[in-house]
Image (cartoon, rainbow, N blue to C red):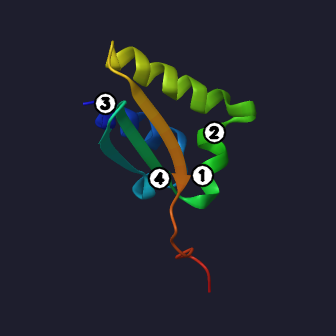
Amino acid sequence: MLADALEHLVRGIVANPDDVRVKDKDLRRGRMLEVRVHPSDVGKVIGRQGRTAGALRTVVGALAGREQVRVDFVDVDQPNRNRR
């Protein structure tokens, strides 16, 4: 549920919503949600001084309740498909 909610939020922010992927991993200290976006969208997801990323982490933390959840944002390693 958390991964789906985070993916929905991130897709609304980025210019390339088809490139958004959220992996849900279980770690010893809790869960980690790894968000992968297109390289040109990394700035949009992080925001000025990390405010957007912080807001996304706050929302996910509120949805998680007592469960520890870590959110990491990375760009995808894909070449740009629209270049000629």
Residue type at the position of mark 2: Ile
Q: Compared with residue 3, is residue 35 higher up or lower down, i.e. above or below?
A: below
Residue type at the position of mark 4: Arg
- Residue that numbered label 1 is attached to: 41
Q: Which of marks 3 and 4 is nearer the N terminus?
A: 3
- Residue that numbered label 4 is attached to: 36
Residue 44 screen position, x and y as percent: 63, 43
Q: Compared with residue 9, is residue 59 higher up or lower down, i.e. above or below?
A: above
- Label 1 crowd (10 A; few <14 / some 14-19 / many >=20): many
Q: Which of marks 4 and 1 is nearer the N terminus?
A: 4
- Callout 3 secondary element: helix
Q: Which of marks 4 and 2 is nearer the N terminus?
A: 4
Q: Residue at 50% across / 20% down in the picture? A: 58
Q: Compared with residue 55, is residue 78 higher up or lower down, i.e. above or below?
A: below
- Label 4 crowd (10 A; few <14 / some 14-19 / many >=20): many
- Label 2 crowd (10 A; few <14 / some 14-19 / many >=20): some
Q: Compared with residue 70, is residue 63 higher up or lower down, i.e. above or below?
A: above
Compute the Cα span from label 1 to label 2: 9 Å
Q: Residue at 47% across / 36% down in the picture? A: 71
Residue type at the position of mark 1: Asp
Residue 63 screen position, x and y as percent: 34, 18
Residue 9 screen position, x and y as percent: 43, 34
Image quarter where the C terminus lies is bottom right
- Callout 2 secondary element: helix
